[in-house]
Image (cartoon, rainbow, N blue to C red):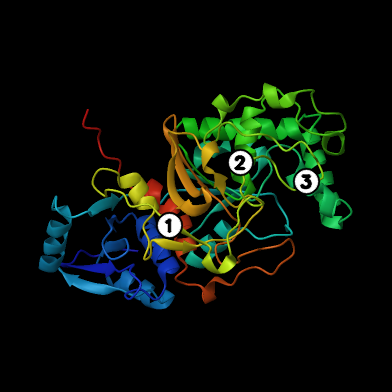
């Protein structure tokens, strides 16, 4: 497809009044980048709008997908960018250069729950590749710019579903499949295989990759790193007892985001550790909102990109891991979204080596208390979801042109 240059631009507004399809707007921007055409992300301008070159192809694609857009003349665009660049404005125009290659870490076959990220990628028409343990251990992560961790348990305890679902056919089948895969890959225990998967993912991030995780994939990943070389699994999970005094043997210096946490020893409790706030929080569903932090677009463009939205208040939602106890979040990790009254962090971001990670608590931004076996969310009913926008901010983040350091 050829894109012809013109003297005008397409503005895709991302404020509440100007956009009918916020989620699909990200897909249009990704589609444009995938055609080797650069775009601009206008941070803090009308909810984080996108500026694209004006072509007939892009106009048509917007119309097909129902995305609202405005045509700006060359002179109007120049005036807009000049205004955004002013030191008096908390705005910035970030160049998006290349469509990131996206991998979703997810087991093959149907799961008894849905994944918010795969649903929104599909709805926004952003392509991705599904990978799992064999690909990760085979170093295929190097092929991708962005990795999402599906609802997962990296500790080898099968999601701590034992008490409620140990007799359920899906649980028995998942356990059998996991054990067969571990054996095929040369491991005696699923916990040991998952530990090595977590270590490969850690190395991917340290080497410059971007990792985005939700729900139980967040804290279970860090716990797996902290428990490297320590058996924290009870007999129903791995066939032998856990190590004595294992709490004192874990090392939170190895984790990405969390510190000073206590592991949940009881296999009958649906919880990994004291990191998660699900059972501790006393928040009414009607008033359950978390606030997004405000960042300088010019001096802190990375967190600013990740919180772009048409509202600063986002509806809360539950998950196996709903949110994080503030006291367990490391001081060098940014809390970008929080419920201050209950002392919980909902949306956090950090740097590890040359790479980045974002952890987002909860399971589905438009299903308050999603349960195993519930029907999936129809995103056509939530095209302007602020909670889902946060996911897509992370998808586009690797496309941003890296600024040279001033030092």
Q: Position of residue 117 (x, y in %)?
A: 55, 57
**Left or right, 275 with reference to 238:** left
Q: Quadrant of the C terminus?
A: top left
Picture layout, residue 242 above or below residue 90:
above
How far apart marks 3 and 1 lie (CA) works out to 30 Å
Q: Residues within 10 Å of mark 1 (few under 14, many from 20)?
A: some
Q: Residues within 10 Å of mark 2 (few under 14, many from 20)?
A: many
Q: Quadrant of residue 25?
A: bottom left
Q: Position of residue 341 (x, y in %)?
A: 49, 53
How far apart marks 2 and 3 lie (CA) works out to 14 Å
Q: Of callouts 3 and 1, which one flags the residue occurring earlier in the amino acid sequence?
A: 3
Q: Quadrant of the N terminus?
A: bottom left
Q: Position of residue 166 (x, y in %)?
A: 86, 50
Picture layout, residue 213 above or below residue 310:
above
Pick whichever, 183 or 336, lies toward us.
336
Residue where numbered disc 1 is placed = 291
User: Which structural element holds mark 3?
Assistant: loop
User: Which structural element holds mark 2?
Assistant: loop
Q: Residues within 10 Å of mark 3 (few under 14, many from 20)?
A: few
Q: Position of residue 327 (x, y in %)?
A: 53, 38
Pick whichever, 104 or 239, lies toward us.
239
Residue where numbered disc 3 is placed = 269
Q: Quadrant of residue 49?
A: bottom left
Q: Quadrant of residue 6?
A: bottom left
Picture layout, residue 146 above or below residue 71:
above
Q: Residue at x 61, y 48 (%)?
A: 277
């Amino acid at each position: 497809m050829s894109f012809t240059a013109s003297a005008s631009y397409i503005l895709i507004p991302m404020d509440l009044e100007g956009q009918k399809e916020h989620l699909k707007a990200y897909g249009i921007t990704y589609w444009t980048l995938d055609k080797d055409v650069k775009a601009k992300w206008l941070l803090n301008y009308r909810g984080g709008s996108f500026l694209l070159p004006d072509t007939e192809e892009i106009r048509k694609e917007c119309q097909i997908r129902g995305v609202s857009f405005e045509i700006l003349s060359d002179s109007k665009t120049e005036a807009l960018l000049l205004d955004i660049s002013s030191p008096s404005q908390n705005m910035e125009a970030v160049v998006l250069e290349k469509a990131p290659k996206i991998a979703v870490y997810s087991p093959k076959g149907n799961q008894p729950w849905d994944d918010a990220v795969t649903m929104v990628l599909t709805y926004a028409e952003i392509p991705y590749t599904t990978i799992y343990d064999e690909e990760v251990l085979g170093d295929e992560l190097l092929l991708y710019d962005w990795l999402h961790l599906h609802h997962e348990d990296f500790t080898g305890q099968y999601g701590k579903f034992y008490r409620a679902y140990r007799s359920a056919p899906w649980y028995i089948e998942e356990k059998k499949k996991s054990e067969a895969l571990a054996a095929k890959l040369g491991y005696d225990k699923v916990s040991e295989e998952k530990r090595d998967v977590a270590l490969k993912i850690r190395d991917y991030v340290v080497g410059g990759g971007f990792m985005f995780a939700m729900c139980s994939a967040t804290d279970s990943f860090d716990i797996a790193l902290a428990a490297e070389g320590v058996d924290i699994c009870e007999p129903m999970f791995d066939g032998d007892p856990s190590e004595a005094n294992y709490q004192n043997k874990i090392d939170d210096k190895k984790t990405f985001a969390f510190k000073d946490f206590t592991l949940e020893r009881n296999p009958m409790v649906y919880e990994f550790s004291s990191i998660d706030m699900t059972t501790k929080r006393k928040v009414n569903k009607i008033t359950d909102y978390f606030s997004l932090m405000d960042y300088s677009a010019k001096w802190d463009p990375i967190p600013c990109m990740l919180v772009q939205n048409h509202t600063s208040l986002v509806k809360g939602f539950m998950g196996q891991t709903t949110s994080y106890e503030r006291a367990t979040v490391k001081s060098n990790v940014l809390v970008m979204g929080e419920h201050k009254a209950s002392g919980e962090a909902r949306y956090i971001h950090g740097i590890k080596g040359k790479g980045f990670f974002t952890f987002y608590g909860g399971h589905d931004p438009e299903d308050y208390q999603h349960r195993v076996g519930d029907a999936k969310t129809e995103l056509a009913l939530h095209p302007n979801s602020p909670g889902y926008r946060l996911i897509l901010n992370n998808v586009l983040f690797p496309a941003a042109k890296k600024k040279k350091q001033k030092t």
